[in-house]
Amino acid sequence: QGKVQGVGFRPFVYRLAREGGLSGHVRNTSQGVEIELHGPAPEVERLLRRLVAELPPLAEITSLSTEDIAPRQDLGAFSILQSQEDATHSVLISPDIAACPDCLAEIHDPADRRHRYPFTNCTNCGPRFSITRSIPYDRARTSMACFPMCPACYSEYHDPLDRRFHAQPNACPDCGPQLWYTDVRGRTLARRDDALRETARDLAQKRIAAIKGLGGFHLACAGDDPEAVAELRRRKNRPHKPLALMVPDLDTLSRFCRISEEAQEWLTGRIKPIVLLPRRNGAMPRELAPDTMDLGVMLPYTPLHILLLAEYAQMLGPDRIPALVMTSGNLSDEPIALGNREALQGLAGIADRFLLHNRDILLRCDDSVLRPLHADAPPLLYRRARGFVPDPITLPQEGENVLGLGADSKATICLSKGERAFVSQHIGDLTNPEALGFYREVVDHARTIHEAEPRVIAADRHPDYASTRHASEYPGLPQVRVQHHVAHILSVMAENDLAQSCLGLALDGTGLGDDGTLWGGELFRVDWEQRAVHRLAHFRQAAVPGGDRAVVEPWRMALSYLLQQGVDPQAYTWPWLPDHSRAQDMVARMIQGGINAPLSSSCGRLFDAVAALLGLADSISYEGQAAVKLEAIQSPDTEEGYTCSVNTETDPAVLESGELFSGVYEDWKRGVDPGAISRRFHVGLCRSLGHLIRHFRQQTGLNRIVLSGGVMQNETMSTLLPHSLARQGCEPFLHTRLPPNDACISLGQVVYARFFT
Ligand code: ZN
Ligand code: ZN
Ligand code: FE
């Protein structure tokens, strides 16, 4: 059992059996693959060993059981039998996989029939998840159904010794999908190879092109040209959020980024996500990522992208850096465009040209984004999509099918079946109506491809989340409401296979708490035996004036913390005062009068307040921008930190987090360099959390601590905090499979519904 279908597993067994002179057969079943072997025992054993040791690149065996059967002499040569049709399936669909070396060699070989063919693939690589309509996975149920194979492809497909035996998306220039290139009105300018060449030429001349890829459209422009990048930002209405780059190879990349060993593995591996890397001083336009020194970069992962980047590099010549901006083809905050017509309509105001093809994308899937941390740790995921989905996470035991509806920001859904939990790709922000449509598609698709009907619906406690409201579409089913930060913690536990009691620290934006206030800086005790979660402590609450308004205008949080710490805001000239002097009085009255100023223990809002006080971000244009800027200015050499006390008189206990803000304020008043202040804030927060946890370790006897929440996207926090906890003897656990942001909520909800109700 495992990932053994559509990945070249049967031909692999066939080859081994033939080599060992064994007879018998191999066939797909609804549970996985069945192999019957007849021959001398040592040869059979050798095959079983090789089965594990020489597994094809995409195959994965999750369990292997053997039994002795009566020998038969009447069998001919080993054979591959037809699939056994069955009502239930537990076979896993593979994620989309980057082009393999064999396919690359073919597209670069002028003598090969697939020379320069952008849709070349084989059993070891190519599209899977994003072209699969339903299961079992075969061509008729994919978007390749409308491309009948030519005789040459047909014979590859049916030859067990061919690399393309049963490769469902198998295609060639004679029978497969084709490219063409159009202007904004859909008029064809070029076809096939000429389309690629024209696209590269236009990009080199600083035009903006929409490019249909694997899981959706990209918007592309010359990444080394400040004007082209600025123009794309203007048209996309995306002033600051970092833009990802695609480069032809590592050599090009090393011209402007430093590449660690771990980063190189991710960049060149089978997934090829966007990898966040430190850029070399002064390299590449600032406009690519104005708030940080990092750049998000990927290598081309389909033959289409490989050919395009090579062509583009040739057009540019050696003086320019051949790096294309490749950002999701959408208007800001909308999901990535899917169909040709949809793209021509939706992206007409952004792109000058369109590189299109006629293979449908059945389900959008963005590029995944991650940051490698260090050698023996999993990477920090920011967006989990292409290459990771639909790989499941294994739950501690079997149970009913639960549909976890997730949260509204960075939404995902999670559907469990047996002991497998399938978390969807990144969907987007559900306050956007387009994203909500995509959300429904993802739910339906998950039910189809995993053949799982939900029996229980789990949603966030927040009644106004669009995801929570989606629960009303399942009126007959039991409904479970899960506290947001409890879901955060349970997700980390499931990802780490941690089915035991532990402490859980959620450092987050905001989520609705059990007491009706907004939580977001919470320490829990998870009692696994009793199946109970207790809130042990939280950050000192601060008013969030204007609710969601305060999230996009962090200066409001600075004002809130100043008042909380008893500072007269009139006593000082704030960096943001010229813009907000009128609003400041109003917001101060909101805070003091408790008018539309809900209380929150959010850690994320504390970061906002500090960033705003330092003049870094009075308002923001993308989620988390204030904290990103605060982290980026750190001077790394200061190891001092502000401290804050823990009040354990109350239950739950209170971390006096406002004292950290006071430390920032005092230093700032003295004119200390903001970079040093930022560092002292990060260090001090980790140290103070260390004190808090030390107290509760002693009180509970629990040594394991799991960490989650949007704040853990901060690289400093996700390295410093676990490090300092480990030093005091704790065993810290971070996310290993999902991002620490709200993309993990759906899994946590499923775990709660399965094990805590
Ligand atoms: Zn291949
Ligand atoms: Zn063909
Ligand atoms: Fe959250």
Image: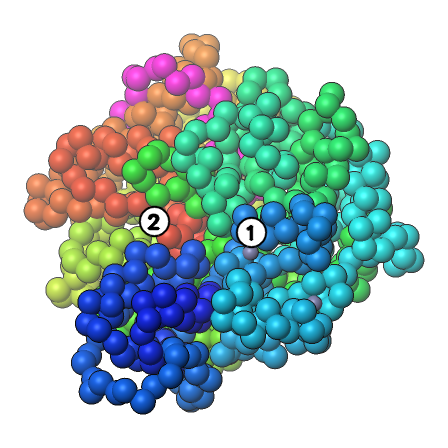
Query: Start and end of the magenta stretch?
Result: 621-644
Q: Describe residue 356's horizontal placement relative to residue 447 as left or right.
A: right
Q: Is residue 274 above or below residue 627?
A: below
Q: Describe residue 584's horizontal placement relative to residue 569 as left or right.
A: right
For disc 1, the marked residue is: 102
Decide: few, some or many residues near mark 2? Use Cα within 10 Å; few <14, some 14-19, many ≥20: some
Say which residue appears at 16% left-offset and 61% top-offset: 528
Q: Which mark is residue 736?
A: 2
Q: Amino acid at mark 2?
A: Thr
Say which residue appears at 63% left-offset and 36% top-offset: 247
Question: Which quadrant of the rendered structure holds the N terminus?
Answer: bottom left
Question: Which quadrant of the rendered structure holds the C terminus?
Answer: bottom left
Q: Position of residue 25 (x, y in %)?
A: 37, 80
Label 2 close to label 1 by CB (< 8 Å): no
Q: Position of residue 411 (x, y in %)?
A: 50, 58
Q: Magenta residues: mostly which secondary structure?
A: loop
Gap between marks 2 and 1 measured at Cα: 31 Å
In the image, 259 versus 480, the foreground residue is 259
Q: How is the image coloured?
A: rainbow
In the image, 3 versus 148, the foreground residue is 148
Q: Quadrant of ligand 1?
A: bottom right
Mark 1 CB within 8 Å of ligand 1: yes
Say which residue appears at 55% left-offset and 51% top-offset: 102
Decide: few, some or many residues near mark 1? Use Cα within 10 Å; few <14, some 14-19, many ≥20: few
Q: Amino acid at mark 1?
A: Asp
